[in-house]
Image (spheres, rainbow, N blue to C red):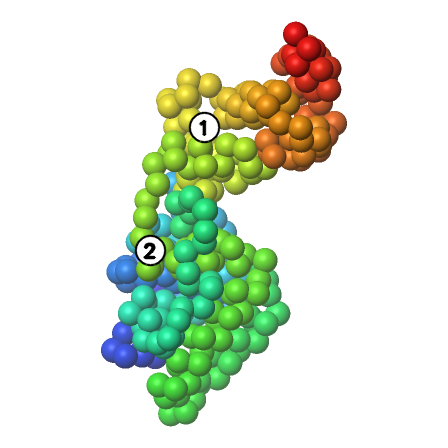
Amino acid sequence: MILDYKKHDLYGKTLIQKIALTSPFRFDFPVSEQACFLYVKKGEFNYRIDDIEINISTDYSLFLNCISSGKQIHNANSESSCEIVIVTFYPEILKKIYDRELPLILQEPKNKISNKSSEKINNDFLIQKYIEGLLFYFENPSLINEDILVLKVKEIILLLSQTQNAEAVQLILSQLFSPSTYTFKQIIEAHLFSQLTIEELAAQSNLSVSSFKREFAKLYNDSPANYIKTKKLEKAAELLLVSDQRITEIAFDCGFSDLANFTKSFNDKYSTTPTNYRVQRRNA
């Protein structure tokens, strides 16, 4: 149930909203070609993507592509209330306020293949202060004007670009200007020799870990961990023969985080160390 709702518009579109809800609630927010930043000022809400339930509590935020992520938040706890501030990003407004050149965080990341569409943003002091500033204008609506709203859009984009979630935010925002959907196989192949965990690969695929493993098994008839490790070791074996790179460099290039793990995994597969493998095969 909605207890209170206030908003400010920019160029004819709803830019900033403040919503007070009492639980249990389900709230649908408008969906178009846009991204949304949802900050929990009080209480908490849950958001579902695939079969993962994400909890966003007080002073935490959710940043998402409203098209590919879905559009509903909810809370089934009948004894709590929730206050949320939403900032919405429209591509046409962003192009207008950045009339010369889009800032880096709005540009498509180079060599980044991902369908990731949502990111939980941790408690951040500067974002808390930003929200307090927005609440002041909700309490004093006569003081708000177009110029201030433009500045507030630029301010939150700058703050998001300085958080530890900046890479994910850039990926989601850039989808507003360069929309693209990659196949499951494209995402796997693009990250095959990275150091991403299975959980991180699932997030790049916009899937839960369980759904990711099911899709992987259908396509490759193998588990993600086994298939990816095998491919990394096969590439390492090839580099040992065709290059003069140091063993450590080859390990990192093939996505292993440390030399000891690489050496053990290599020995398990080829029954010899990487150094001996190179010497024996080159002298054969």
Could you say where residue 282 lies in the image, as x and y percent from the top left?
66, 14
Residue 35 shows in the view: yes
Q: Would you call the spot at circle 2 few (<14 residues within 10 Å), some (14-19), or many (20 or more)?
A: few
Residue at image position (71%, 31%) is 246
Q: Where does the C terminus fall, quadrant-wise?
A: top right
Q: Where does the N terminus fall, quadrant-wise?
A: bottom left
Check the image and report above or below for 87 versus 225.
below
- In this orientation, which residue lies closer to the viewer: 141 or 222? 222
**Element carrying mark 1:** helix
| Cα separation between marks 1 and 2 | 28 Å
Could you say where residue 269 lies in the image, as x and y percent from the top left?
63, 14
* Residue type, label 2: Ser
* Residue type, label 1: Lys
Earlier sequence position, callout 1 versus callout 2: 2
Outermost residue toward the top in this view: 284
Residue at image position (71%, 15%) is 279
**Element carrying mark 2:** loop
Could you say where residue 183 lies in the image, as x and y percent from the top left?
34, 36
Q: Which residue is labeled 2 in the image?
A: 178
Residue at image position (45%, 47%) is 112
Check the image and report above or below for 15 versus 227.
below
Q: Which residue is labeled 1 in the image?
A: 213
**Residue 18 lies in quadrant:** bottom left
Depth check, mark 1 against mark 2: the one in front is: 2
**Residue 4 lies in quadrant:** bottom left
Could you say where residue 207 lies in the image, as x and y percent from the top left?
42, 39
